[in-house]
Amino acid sequence: MKKHDKGFEERAVDEREWQAQERARLEARIGGTSDDPLVARYRKVSQALRAPLPDALPDDFAAQVARMAQAGVAAPMHVEEPDSPFERDLTRVLVGLFGVAAVVFAAMFGKAWLAPTMELLRLDSGVAVNWVLALGACVGATWLTEQVRRHRQDAHA
């Protein structure tokens, strides 16, 4: 016997399900009712499938868009509100605290990290050359993508 071959009981369950679905479909169409709870359950599904989808767009949406395009109306732009004085002052305080923390950190641990950092910055070091090349590649890739973006924007305008 094949593994994918269904047994008699499974085929009987499938047949009952199919018959219940068909009766529910027909009852939903003619408006009948059944005492079978399986048919009643499938009738709800059938009614939901027969109901039209809600329209998300108005009937004359295409005409409205065409009129807007013909008039040259641009899409509304998002305008950011200016920062409140509280946010601006809070940002200044936090930047100041960050600066003070950086100075304190440099004073406390400067000897431990300053010498190795200066060693890496020497251009005769192989590691430094690799970092300079990586930096150059990043700057070049950023510049190139900006040029491509501007070119596409000019082409579409």
Image (cartoon, helix red, strand yellow):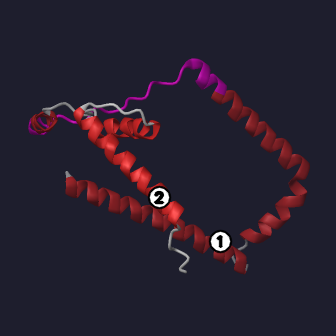
Please indicate whether residue 61 sits to the left or right of residue 131 in the image.
left
Horizontally, is 102 left or right of 143 in the view?
right
Where residue 5 appears, as percent x and y from the top left, is 50, 73
Nearest to the observer: residue 50 or residue 103:
50
143 is within the stretch colored magenta:
no
Total number of numbered discs in the rendering:
2
Q: Secondary structure at mark 2?
A: helix
> What residue sits right under mark 2 in the picture?
12
Give the mark nearer the N terminus: 1 vs 2: 2
Residue furthest out toward the top:
85
The residue labelled by disc 1 is 131
61 or 128, nearer to the observer:
61
Task: Residue 27: name its quadrant.
Answer: top left
Residue 146 place in picture, x, y as percent: 39, 58
**Residue located at (29% from left, 36% from top):** 28
Above or below 18: residue 125: below
Name the kind of residue labelled 2 in the image. Ala
| Residue at (59, 71) in percent of width and height | 134
**CA neighbours of label 1 inside 10 A, class few (<14), some (14 to 19), many (20+):** some
Q: Element type at marker 1?
A: helix
The amino acid pointed to by label 1 is: Trp
Q: Position of residue 24 (x, y in %)?
A: 34, 40
Q: Which residue does the image show at 11% across and 39% down from the upper left?
A: 66
Q: Can see residue 53?
A: no
Q: Quadrant of residue 55?
A: top left
Q: At x 32% / y 35%, what residue is drawn?
A: 47
Q: Residues within 10 Å of mark 2 (few under 14, many from 20)?
A: few
- Indicate yes or no whether the magenta region holds residue 78: yes
The magenta segment is 69-90
Quadrant, the N terminus: bottom right
Query: How far apart are the alpha carbons under marks 1 and 2?
Result: 71 Å
